[in-house]
Structure formats: structure tokens, C-alpha cells
Amino acid sequence: MNLLFHLTIIALTLSLTLGCASTQSSKEGCLELTKKANQSFQADNWKKYIKDSKNYIESCRNVDSSESISMAYSLMVVAFLNMKQPNDALDSANLCISTYYANPDCHLKKATILLQLHRFEEAKNSLNIAERTTKEQLSVIDSYIIASRSSPERESYMTKKASYMQTLEFIELLRKIFSPK
């Protein structure tokens, strides 16, 4: 679970760094909503986090990237699981996937929930998709690293790459834990 927590913090950090795609005031408003949700998350105030995230999603759906919105759904999964609401967590995981299918974290969170619900075949399918999308994202990131023009830009991509590598490790760990002996 410690690795899941670290992946969640990395995902939250990445969602904060993704840019907005509209006017400066809209960008600033979305950044403020993201910061507010982040504070609730860090305080383990799960109900408030869900409320703040829903506000962010509603207000910024047409301003922020689909990837950023999907990260909010992904973190809502964590909040619902902490409140012992796996069905709501599964709904959020599915919204995460429908918002940005290429986000491996969405599929990984869905697999984790399905494992908790003892829906092993569905979980295995979600793990396979998580692995495939993670490898696809790694390939894209590698091309960005090669093409990057500045050290800060390269560092940003290297951080993202490290996150995806941790995701692959977590997928392998889940497979080992839940595979038949």
C-alpha cells in the first residue's frame, strides 16, 4: 500500500503541473481549485476532497487537459477507498478511463478496486491495459526526453518517466500477490 500512496502523490503532483488551455484568468482559477483540492487530499479530508475535486472537474473540464481531469478522478478513487466506498471508487475509476483512456493510473486504480472486490478476471484485464498504456506512455516520454531542449524540460520528463517505471513495478507486484500459486 506504501507504493500505491507514493504513486498517488506522484499523480497528484503531475496533475498540478499540467497546464491549462484557456485564458489566464481561467488558468488561475483552475490552479486555485486544484490547490484547494490538494490541501484537502493532503489533510486526509476525503469528503472535502471529493467535493473540491467535483468542483474542479465541473469548472475546468473545458479549460484543463483531459489528462488533468482524469488525474482528479484517479485521486477521487483513493478518497472513496479511504472512506470504504469501493463502488463509488469504481465509478470514479471508470470516469477516469472515459476521460483519458491513455492514463495508466486509471486502469491501475480500477484493477486495484476489482481485486478488492474479488473480481479477478476483470482485474487481470485492467492490469493488462495498465501495463500496455504505461509502456506506451514510456515510449512517448522517451521521445520527449530525446527532443527536449532544456535541462528543466528534460528533468520534468525524467520525473514522469520515473513515475511510469514505478507504475510498472506496482503492476508486477499486484500480479505476484494475486496470481494463483
Image (spheres, rainbow, N blue to C red):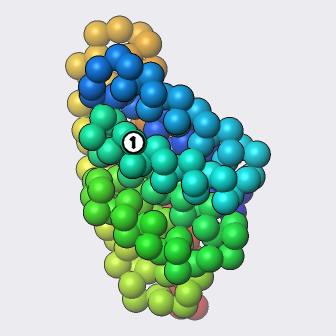
The quadrant in which the N terminus is found is bottom right
The quadrant in which the C terminus is found is bottom right
Residue 82 drawn at (x, y percent): 69, 66
Horizontally, residue 4 falls left or right of residue 18, namely right
Q: Nearer the viewer, residue 157 or 95?
A: 95
Q: Nearer the viewer, residue 127 or 98?
A: 98
Q: Residue at x 74, y 52 (%)?
A: 44
- Badge 1, how many Cα within 10 Å: few under 14, some, many 20+? some
In the displayed structure, would residue 124 be above or below residue 81? Answer: below
Horizontally, residue 37 falls left or right of residue 57, namely right
Q: Quadrant of residue 96?
A: bottom left
Q: Residue at x 67, y 59 (%)?
A: 47
Q: Residue at x 30, y 35 (%)?
A: 63
In the displayed structure, would residue 126 be above or below residue 165? Answer: below
Q: Nearer the viewer, residue 38 or 165?
A: 38
Residue placed furthest toward the top: 150
Residue 110 drawn at (x, y percent): 45, 71
Horizontally, residue 35 falls left or right of residue 123, namely right
Q: Quadrant of residue 140?
A: top left
Is residue 148 in view? yes
Residue 65 drawn at (x, y percent): 30, 39
Is residue 130 in view? no
For disc 1, the marked residue is 59
Residue placed furthest toward the right: 43
- The three-letter amino acid code for the residue at tag 1 is Ser
Numbered disc 1: secondary structure = helix
Residue 168 drawn at (x, y percent): 46, 56
Q: Quadrant of residue 84?
A: bottom right
